[in-house]
């Protein structure tokens, strides 16, 4: 199969497009002909070696975790899928493998693609939507009627978080974005929008039940006074400035949590229901051919993508 791979950590130019062995199919997995994948910030952080204790020194590595495509073969224990089914999901081992013509997906974390979605739309969803859902519901403990702020609401995770907060019943959603994305945040369903260049949300005291930092540009230390009593601050990446105050927050009424997306079939089914109903819509910034994944990584690293970056597999 053709795939994107790298044989050593480094900048985007370490990525190669070429032949790699087909993945081995286990009894509880489905083999998928990938039609679309995506680029998430974690992909280039892995490529740069930031997660080396987890990813190790075994090469070559194929990046990517999100896939949408067609089942071409099923493992002996698989019962929910058959060849020809359209599926989507996130590879669950955390090491990648999605940016290729073929990938294997465990049955328990795979889902049928919502019929109304394209492959590209479906591939844009899993990791970012998981992060938003699990960050808000599980780590943030968001309850119906509560007030939530999404920092970085135009990002891949943030754009899902605004919509998922509403789907979970948030009473008020405030989006923090740059000036050019104010109208976009309103279209996503935000009740209030803050242009971060004009106003620092941390100046608003005792306002939010949950602050979800989708881009990890704030800190718990700076944000905690904006939380109401019993409020929760959730981040996608803990800030070094919170190395003391973050753990210490567990002893206070205002908690700090971090979210690391977990592949869960039940969560993906719920996300699929929202996608099909139109309650949640993928926001795609740019699409790149699979062979141009290095360019897609560079674009992601600039930090200006509005929504998701998708890879198209011909």
Image: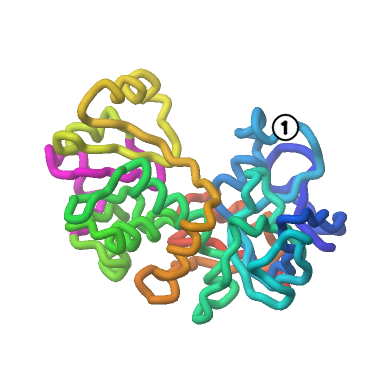
In-front residue for pair 231/295: 231
Going 21% across and 55% down the picture, which residue do you hit?
144
Q: What stretch is highlighted in magenta?
A: 192-218
Lateral position of residue 100 relative to residue 213, left or right:
right
In-front residue for pair 271/40: 271
Lateral position of residue 18 relative to residue 231, left or right:
right
Residue 185 locus on image (x, y percent)? 30, 63
Label 1: element kind: loop
Residue 252 locus on image (x, y percent)? 23, 24
Q: Can residue 288 be seen in this view?
A: no
Q: Residue pushed farthest bottom? A: 116
Seen in the picture, residue 68 relative to 242 is either above or below; the reply is: below
Quadrant in which residue 290 is drawn: bottom right
Is 163 magenta? The answer is no
Lateral position of residue 217 relative to residue 94, left or right:
left
Quadrant in which residue 213 is drawn: top left
Is 205 magenta? The answer is yes
Going 63% across and 44% down the picture, which residue do you hit?
94
Quadrant in which residue 89 is drawn: bottom right
Residue 304 locus on image (x, y percent)? 45, 55
**Label 1 neighbourhood size at 10 Å, few (<14), some (14-19), many (20+)?**
few
Seen in the picture, residue 97 relative to 51 is either above or below; the reply is: below
Q: Name the residue under label 1.
A: 56
Going 15% across and 38% down the picture, which residue do you hit?
228
Numbered disc total:
1
């Amino acid at each position: 199969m053709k795939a994107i791979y790298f044989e050593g950590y480094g900048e985007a130019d370490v990525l190669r497009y070429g032949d790699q062995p087909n993945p081995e199919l286990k009894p509880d997995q489905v083999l998928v002909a990938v039609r679309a994948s995506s680029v998430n910030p974690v992909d280039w952080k892995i490529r740069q070696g930031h997660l080396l204790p987890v990813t190790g020194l075994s090469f070559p590595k194929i990046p990517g975790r999100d896939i949408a495509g067609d089942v071409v073969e099923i493992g002996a224990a698989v019962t929910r899928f058959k060849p020809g089914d359209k599926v989507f999901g996130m590879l669950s081992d955390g090491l990648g493998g999605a940016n290729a013509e073929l990938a294997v997906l465990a049955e328990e974390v795979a889902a049928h693609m919502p019929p109304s979605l394209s492959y590209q739309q479906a591939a844009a969803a899993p990791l970012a939507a998981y992060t938003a859902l699990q960050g808000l519901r599980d780590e943030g403990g968001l309850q119906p009627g509560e007030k939530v702020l999404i920092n970085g609401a135009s990002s891949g995770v943030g754009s899902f978080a605004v919509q998922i907060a509403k789907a979970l019943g948030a009473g008020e959603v405030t989006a923090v974005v740059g000036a050019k994305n104010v109208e976009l945040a309103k279209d996503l369903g935000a009740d209030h929008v803050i242009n971060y260049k004009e106003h620092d949300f941390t100046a608003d005291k005792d306002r939010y039940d949950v602050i979800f930092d989708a881009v990890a540009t704030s800190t718990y230390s700076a944000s905690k006074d904006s939380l109401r009593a019993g409020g929760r601050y959730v981040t996608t990446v803990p800030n070094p400035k919170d190395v003391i105050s973050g753990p210490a927050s567990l002893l206070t009424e205002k908690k700090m949590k971090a979210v690391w997306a977990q592949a869960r079939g039940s969560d993906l089914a719920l996300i699929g229901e929202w996608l099909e109903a139109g309650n949640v819509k993928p926001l795609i910034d740019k699409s790149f051919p699979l062979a141009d994944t290095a360019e897609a990584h560079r674009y992601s690293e600039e930090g200006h993508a509005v929504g998701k970056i998708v890879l198209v597999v011909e």
